[in-house]
Each structure stands twice: as structure tokens, then as C-alpha cells.
Amino acid sequence: MSKKTLPDIEKDFAQWYQEVIYEAELVDKSPIRGCFVIRPYGTSLWENIKAILDKRIKETGHQNAMFPLFIPQSFISKEAEHVEGFSPELAIVTHAGGKELEEPLVVRPTSETMIHYMFAKWIRSWRDLPLKINQWANVVRWEMRPRAFLRTTEFFWQEGHTAHETAQEAEQEAKMMLQEYVNLAQDYLAVPVIAGVKSESEKFPGADKTFTFEALMPDGKAVQMGTSHIISRNFAKVFGMSYQNREGQLDFPYLTSWGATSRLIGATVMMHGDAKGLVLPPKIAPTQVVIIPIFKKGVDNAAVLEVAETVKEKLSKEMSVFVDDDEAKTPGAKFYKWELKGVPVRIEIGPRDIKEGKVVVADRLGESKEAVALDEVATYVQKLLADMQKALFEAASQKVKDQWKKAEKLASFSKDLAEKGGFYQTGWCRNPECEKELKKYQATTRCLLEEKTFEKCFHCDQDSISDVLVAKSY
Ligand SMILES: [Zn+2]
């Protein structure tokens, strides 16, 4: 890793992001436009996030399964809204095995159709409900303006699909998983989010209702971090998902689906990064502590290395630790490297420290650097990691607060919206024509809010139904 100055995060946030993800070795470009290689460091980060979410998915009563990568094209066409929404983004296989296929196969953009086809086979009676399935997979949606982790042609995600006897149960399920996502974002990624319902024009193609959780990045643009849907019952009908209900009559189940993607990584990077590089929340960092033995030239460094290994052993029971014992690199170069990679805590061990029975512990935020006695180091680092996790969430919450404005009329906030970004809470009549006005400023409605602060719509003279959050987005 060569020492390279990152673009100024204050002046050119987009370029900073574009470079930090490569420099920190999270991703690399692949020969296919829009498809990125997730390098080992980025993969570890994703695996950590995945492990947390997977555990909760199972604890809330879902089972993992795996469905085919290919979907018969006719499946996608069965549901009108679904096909209309996804058509422009589909990758379609027309030839295989050396000849033209009888029916083209779509590389899955999402698996509703395939899973509903299977649900129709599996759901025969009310006793088969609820059916709660999750899949960890990669999906393909052709992307014209790719940006690593945020918008990519191929991306990694989980998609949950469930079927229920009643509409209430389906709604409870969609809301429960939304809450799981909110907890993941806030408690682990330290990214504050706002949860709400999408407008008619912004909802998932084929959903009756889409719940979303959105974060606001430091450059004033929103990121949709994941969604949870109440799927149209039309899906159950077109896929012939009839079953015998408790009254012995034929009925159709109520469906949900919910997904969160590797985009969570992009949002975490943008939310916390600084001039030196990534700042990873301790709870998801692949390496939580890096130990750097300070070697001196012309001396036997065995004692320093031995202490470094002892400290590693002490800490490894509770956290992930790496000893950077590369003798060819200076301590300065190592500090730079691990700061760039966002490792939360650094421990320096030099000959003088050993004599005093101490090590130097510093946090990635640059807020604390202390000499700590060897027998106290485990407790000290544990607390430092917890404090840092909390500090990151608090700092991020403050950033969002500073960029969240309440405003009555679009005319009064359109200039700031276009130039500075931010969340704008305003009133809306729910007419899609008024929503279209936002496009002039490259903005959209992000989610409907339950509050009602304003009497009138942000654009027309009609009454507002409830507040809505408006922003530009990734
Ligand atoms: Zn209006």
C-alpha cells in the first residue's frame, strides 16, 4: 500500500469516497462495468454484518434456503407491475449449452417470482402457514451509473419472503423486520436512520406498501439502506398459491418480502470516514485492535515481540486482534495504513514501555492516547471500543440533526435542497404531480412521516395529509 493523499473529504466528498474504498482495500474494479470485486477486507466486513443479521433472522423464526440464480422470463412477466419495474434492469440469458434456449432465463434481480412459484407448491393448508424463508444471495440489476457498494450491477443481499393467513400478520412481519434493520443500522453500524413508508411512486414494483429505512450522509444525500414490503396479493393469485383455510375454503396467503444489501457498507463508510480514511464501528470492524511493536535498529527486538504476542493472547478472547510485525515497515507507515483501514484501536509497544510494564493505547478518533498497565489493558480496550461505538453514533446523530430542516413551501427550500442537500420535512397532499416537482432539484420523497406539522402541501394549495421527508439520494 503506497502512501497517497486522499481527496479532501470536506471539499470533495464524492471523490473521497471513490478513492478511500480502493485505498483501504475494500473493493477493486473488475473487468465488467458495474460489477466489483469485494476484497478480503471488504468481505470480512460484510461477513460481520451478515452474521449479526442472520442471527436475528433465525431468532425471529425464519429459515434460510437457496433458490436458483436463473428465473424463466415468463415468471417475471406474470405480475404486471413487477415486469414494468424491472424490465429495464434485467440481464437475460438467451443461449446456453451451445444453442438458443426455448425460453430465455433472467438472472435474478430479486426472487419473488421464483420463491412464490415454490410457495405455491409448499402451501396446501393453513397448517403450512406462516411460511418464513430467507435467502442470502447475489442479484443482478443492470446499472448505468455504478458506484461501489451503493449502486452496482451485481450486489449481495438477503431477501426474506413470507406468507401468512391474515393481512395483520403480514403487516406485523414487515414492520418487525423493518425494526430489525433499524436496530442493525443504529446499534451495530452506528448509522442513525429514519423509518417510514414509501410514496406510491417510490414503492417496490409489486408491493402494496413499502417500508424503508433511510440514512442521511454527511454530504446531504440520503441512502435507502433497505426495505420491507407488503407484497400485492396479486402475486399469490398469478402464481396459483391457493390453500385450504381454517374454514375449509380456498384462500390466498398474504405475502411480505424484505431485503438489505451490501449498500450497508457504503453508508457506514460515508457516515463515519474522515480525512485519514475509514472509521469502522468497533462492533463490525474486521480487526478491532492492531498491535504495533516499535522495533529499534541494531537491538534484539524479541522482548517487544513477545509482549506484543502476550497482549494479543489476552485480548483475543474478547476481540479480533492483529499484530503488525512487519520489520520492513516503519511504525509511521503502519500507523498510516491501519488508520486508513479504520481499525478502531491501536496499541503501540516499545522497549521503554515494556520496562515500565505498560503499552500505549490510542483510538482511531484521535480522542485518546494513554499509557496503560499491562494487566489492565484488556479491560481498558474493552471500554474504549464500547465508548467509541457510542461516540460514533452520537456524532452521526448530530450530523443528521444539523442537516434536518422543517420547511413549508418548496419555493423556500429548493435552492438549499439543490445546493446543500439535507433532509427537508414538509407537508404533502400525496398527489404524485406535486412529487414530480422535486425532480427539478434531483430530489425525491424519501418516506412519509406520521407527524403532521404543516397544514398545506409543499407545492400546491391542497391540504397536507401528513409530513414527508424530501432529499436528494444515492
Ligand atoms: Zn400538492
Image (cartoon, helix red, strand yellow):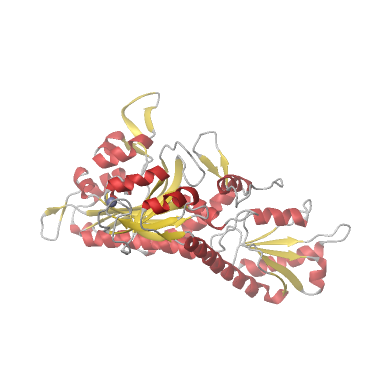
Image vertical order of residue 299 relative to residue 87, above or below: below
- Name the residue nearer the viewer: 421 or 416: 416
Query: For the view shown, which residue lies furthest in the right direction?
Result: 298
Horizontal placement of 228 versus 251: left or right?
right
The number of callouts visible is 0
Q: Can residue 79 be seen in this view?
A: no
Quadrant position of residue 384: bottom right
Image vertical order of residue 354 relative to residue 22, above or below: below
Residue 101 placement (x, y as % from top left): 33, 27
Horizontal placement of 160 versus 154: left or right?
left
Horizontal placement of 431 versus 386: left or right?
left
Please name the residue shown 55% across and 53% down the image.
44
Q: Is residue 408 visible?
A: yes
Residue 79 placement (x, y as % from top left): 24, 41
Residue 293 placement (x, y as % from top left): 76, 61
Please name the residue shown 87% across and 60% down the image.
299
